Structures are given as structure tokens and as C-alpha cells.
Image: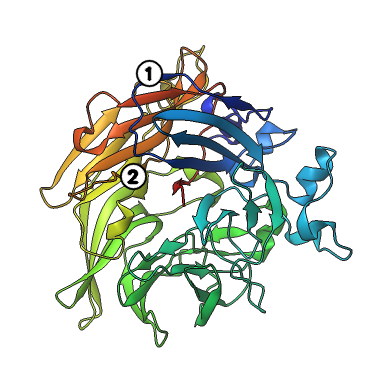
Amino acid sequence: MRPERYTRGNFAPVTEEVTAYDLPVSGAIPADLNGRYLRIGPNPLGLEDASAHIWTLGEGMVHGVRLRDGRAEWYRNRWIRSASVADRLGEPRRGRTAEAGFDERFDFAPNVQVAGHGGRVYALIEGGIAPYELTPELETVGPCDLGATPEGFTANAHTKFDHRTGEMHSLAFRYGADFLQHIVFSPGGTAERVTNIPAPTLPYMHDFGLTEHYVLIYTSPVVFDPQRLATGVPFGWNPELPSQVGVMPRAGGAVQWIDLPPGMVGHTLNAFEEAGSIVVDVAWHPGRFDIADIGGGRPVLERWTLDLAAGKARTELLHDRPQDFPRLNGRYSGRPYRYGYTASTELYAAPSTIDADRPDEGFSNAVLKHDLVAGTTEAHEFGRDAAAGETVFVPSATAAAEDDGYNLLYVHDPERGAADLVILAAQDFAGEPLARVHLPARVPLGLHGNWIPEA
């Protein structure tokens, strides 16, 4: 995909912050949805050169809707106030960015994930760049030390929450470091255990896996390359390096490395232990992956069965439609489960077939529900130009089954030129939405988010 693609259509950044109350709704919001749906993504502030733009380097903007008692109380979108964002907006710097001696080289407005833990809300990124804490109304408190260790690591974007223990886990890397860190947080958000893991190939590691007893580490030919620092994306593809999954006990210890075909994990759907093996379901990018063009790949859903005694992996294609951003009912994270949800990332037009008045390709605008026991898949198709993103599963208040709950996601409404927060009944996934909350602004295609229930 061309670099300017990420500045057009539904990738295009929005230029204003909006606050709106008592949002109009089509259908009925389930009364047991009491909390905030938040999602973040790159939203460049003052983009100057679209031809050289790298989408992942856009300043983070979080979009949120507050639901309570069947009402949509508010919508807000806010840039994360890193030092440079605050300066450009003519505002005072927040938190420790105002201190003398603050190192601005490592300051960036996180744009990958927004999550809650220990009663607080954090905007997260990776590579040792500091997370930022947000207020419940999405205002920036400032950079924080979530998971900070003496070696300069902080919590990575894809943290994992263990519902059985209340712990949060992070597998963190730092640009140029030849080791990783597994950081375990208490239910209150304090980093209580750190394990260093050698990683001499300097891998880029966006996600990881977690089971009841193991941490799963992914390496690939996508590695840190200091010669690419000037490009803003200091990672390249080294075909001489293997793709592997490492298995380490959660308490620390030796890592067992198991070879995989060439490729890279986009994201983990889930992982669990079964009869002496470990089962891992991932969005897998087969072959070469270009981190500067993350929308140009064709990831598929794969299952790996890791035989620890034999040191081998059996791989199985679960679904070949291009898809990523996998989610599940979080209560089943690290455990055997049945249902997974993904967002289609399939292009609906190749560049050579695009109409002259439609100069850019787009996504096929569907979310998928996979029944991994029955081996079936349902699709909820939103139609051309809908720009549907990641869906988050929220269990119902009286859930008796794994898929008893709701799927929440932002979907562009081309007729209004703005987004809806769409609420699907997970057990009637392809049916009409339960509700559409009509937002007053467009929500660009972004990255990840979460449902943060009222405490």
C-alpha cells in the first residue's frame, strides 16, 4: 500500500477534539452495559507530507463512549498530551514532562492500546516508551512508570490480564536491547516480578501468549536495525533469521525454542494447555512482513499445537480470509475456549482496479465470529466504506455461556460521514445490531481498545 493511503479515506486523521452528550441511539443499548468503550490509534497532528507518512508514527488519539442505564452519556476524542503534543497545542506540559532534564527523545503520544488496570486508565505503546495515564474523561494526567524497570523497560502495548489471579502480565522489549522482560503486575497495578529473557537477535515483539503455567515468546526475521533509525521505523526483515516460539515457565526459567515457518505473529487470539501440549491461536503473517506498511499484509488465523517433549509445532490453518485484531471472552484467556472474534483486513479493491474517482483501496468491513469447536465462522458484513475496526467482547451480567454477551466496535457510517458505536449480540452475531450509538464525528481506522466497566 502507498504511504499516502494512510492519510486518506477512513485512515485520514480527524483535526478536532469533540465532546458530545446524550448521544442519539438506534435500537436499545443493553442495560447491563455500564462503563466506557475506549479505542486508540494514530492520529497525526499537523501532517505535512503525506507521501512520506508512516501511519504508526501518528500521535495517539483515544475515542470513548460512556454507557449507563441504557443511555450513551457522552462521546469524547482526545490526543494524548505528550510533551510535543502539548507544545503544539499551546498547552502546559503534563506530569513529569514539565520537569527540568526530561529526555524528550523518548517521549511520544502512545497510539497502540488503551486499557484499565488497578482502577486507572493507561494509553500504551511499546519499545520502552512510557505509557500515559488518562482520567476517566480521557484527559491526560501525564507519563507514568507502569512497569518501569532500571533497564528502561515499561509495560508493552499488549498486556495480558489473568482473571484467575487478578494479575496483569507484559512482555516488554526496548529498542536495541538484547533481552526482553516479562513483567508481572499485582491486581493493584504494582510491578511485583521481573524476569529477563535473552533475545540476541533484537526482535520486534508486538504481542505474546500466556497460559496457566507458561509465557509464549514470538521471534521472527523482523528485527531491530540501527541503520533504519532515520526512517522512524528501525526494524527490517533479515531472511537469515528463523521464526520461532519460545516457551518459558511463568515463574521464570529456561526458554524452549520451537521452529516455525517464516512469518510473523500479528496478534494472539488465545493460548492454553492441553494433554501435555500447548495450543496457540494467532493472526499469522506468512512470509515477509513490512512493519512500515502494516495494512499491506494478508494475515490468516492459524492454530499451533506445541509438542514440548518433541520440541515441534504442528500448524493448522483455521481460516484463510485475511483477518487480524483477534479478541475473545477475557474470562477464558489462557484456558480452553470455543469462540474467537476477528476483524477482516481484506482489501476490497486492488490498486489496478480502482475507479478513477476512488483513488484508494479500502477494507472489506466485516467482523468474524469463529466457533473453534464446530469449525464454523459467521461474518457480520457492514458494507462498502463502513471501515469496521477491532471488536471487543463484553460478557452479559448474567452470562451462562461463553458467547453470552456483546460485541462492541466503531463502524463508519458513509451516509452521515461519522461513526457509530455498534453493539452486536454475540449469540446472534450476523443479525441486526442491538444498537447503534450515533457519534458526532468520524473515528479513523485505528488499533486497539477495551471495555472498562464501572468499578
- In this rendering, the answer to whether 84 lies above or below 143 is above
The location of residue 178, given as percent across then percent down, is 58, 77
From the viewer's perspective, is residue 225 above or below residue 230? below
Residue at image coords 50%, 36%: 66
The x and y percentages for residue 274 are 17, 71
Give the residue type at disc 1. Ser
**Which residue matches tag 2?**
393
Q: Give x and y (percent) for residue 146.
A: 60, 66
Outermost residue toward the bottom in this view = 253
| Pointer 1 local density, CA inside 10 Å: few below 14, some 14–19, many at least 20 | few
Measure how far apart labels 1 and 2 are at the Cα level. Answer: 20 Å
Question: Which mark lies nearer to you, 1 or 2?
Answer: 1
Residue 367 visible within the image: yes
Residue highlighted by disc 1: 26
At 79% across and 51% down in the image, what residue appears? 83
Image coordinates of residue 279 in percent, x first then y, are 23, 66
Which amino acid lies under the numbered mark 2 shown in the image of this protein? Phe
Name the element at disc 1: strand
Determine the secondary structure under disc 2: strand
Left or right of 209, for residue 357? right
Q: Quadrant of residue 249?
A: bottom left
